[in-house]
Image (tube, grey):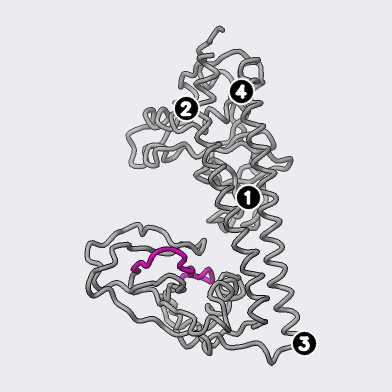
Amino acid sequence: MGLTKYKIGDFVEAYNYRCGIPDLLPEQVSGISIDKEFFEPAKQVGEDTSSYKIVPPNCFACNLMHVGRDNALPVALNHSEINKHVSPAYSVFKLKNENIILKEYFYIFLKSSEKDRLFSFHTDSSIRQGLPWEDFCDIDITLPNIDQQRKFVNVYLSLQNNLAAYQSKVEDLKMVCDGYIEELRRDYVRNQSDKMVRIGNYISKRNEVNSDGQIELEQGINIQKKFITPQRSNSNLYSRRIVRRGDIAYCTQLNNANVAVAYRDGDDCVVSSVYDIIYVKDTSALLPKYLMLWLIRPEFGRYVYTCSTGSAYEFLSYDDLADYKIPLPDIAIQQAIVNIYDSYIERQRIADALKEQLKNICPVLIRGSLTE
């Protein structure tokens, strides 16, 4: 099999077209995830979006500004059939043709962590360690012939299609759970408003401190409502608050209506003093996971944000949290809803693992195409 060396600039060209729309909504603007996929809505959107760039179907977008700093090239291929809009800081490009390289093969090439190191090596000496467009185009790439590329692209696309089919079933399960919760809320508001209960009647605040230092696992909570390893660890955990298995922890300091709240399903841990911890006093009346399903809803976030007090920072008091009302059906109905949600969480975990495997197979496919 013959291999040929090219410059990236031999087969890509910039695509610099502005959208001219001054008031794009956040959900109309895309960012690029660490998995090298587009996501919406974007995290930040400017007041005037006229200069935002268009990414047509089958075109790429990437952020070359701080490749070295992040040791990764944030890049994505528009697989959809509609235009996407990205920040003017992004570089948008397309293939001149597919005589040299298939767009899917180039995408697999760009997704490889090995190639992230290659791009980082070519960055400039600025603070952000950016990769100038000219330097990006000047990078060498060794390619097999088109038939060989297509063979390995077909393997990747087959795996990707299987993942997409599985992910769609996962989303269907989440839709069932969300629909069940919403219908329950509407039914109680319409017909059983007297059964909407204060959660304060069923919860208590946990005020345990890790004074003996027995718990060494420190955690934080992200906006996805999950416990995570905090960005800044603390060597002194004696003053940290304890979260027991089955507890719910939430951040009392609010930046917006997206409350950092999470149910503790793992081992006991400790959290910063910016968190409060609650637990259900009687699980025969209220299941903690059922309660959590209401606390992750956007309407709860809007409720606590309107109740919050403060100036530069907004704070959520325990009393305001306790005043939040939810429907309280029979415990068997609560358990049925929780079971559906648990199934969704497990299948989402599997989908995430499959997605990670698909990402990890990219360098294997590239190496295979070059050595077979």
Magenta part of the protein: which range? 255-271
Q: Is residue 128 magenta?
A: no
Observer-side mark, 2 or 3, equals 3
Q: Give the left or right position of residue 205, taking residue 44 as reference.
A: left
Secondary structure of residue under mark 1:
loop
Observer-side mark, 1 or 3, equals 3
Quarter-of-image position of residue 102: top right
Quarter-of-image position of residue 345: bottom right
Image point (49%, 44%), residue name: 34
Residue 118 point in image, percent of width and height: 41, 27
Above or below for 275 versus 120: below
Per the image, the residue denoted by label 3 is 191
Per the image, the residue denoted by label 2 is 136
| Distance from Cα at disc 1 to Cα at disc 4 | 40 Å
Q: Earlier in the sequence, mark 1 or mark 3?
A: 1
Above or below for 198 versus 345: below
Secondary structure of residue under mark 3:
helix
Per the image, the residue denoted by label 1 is 50
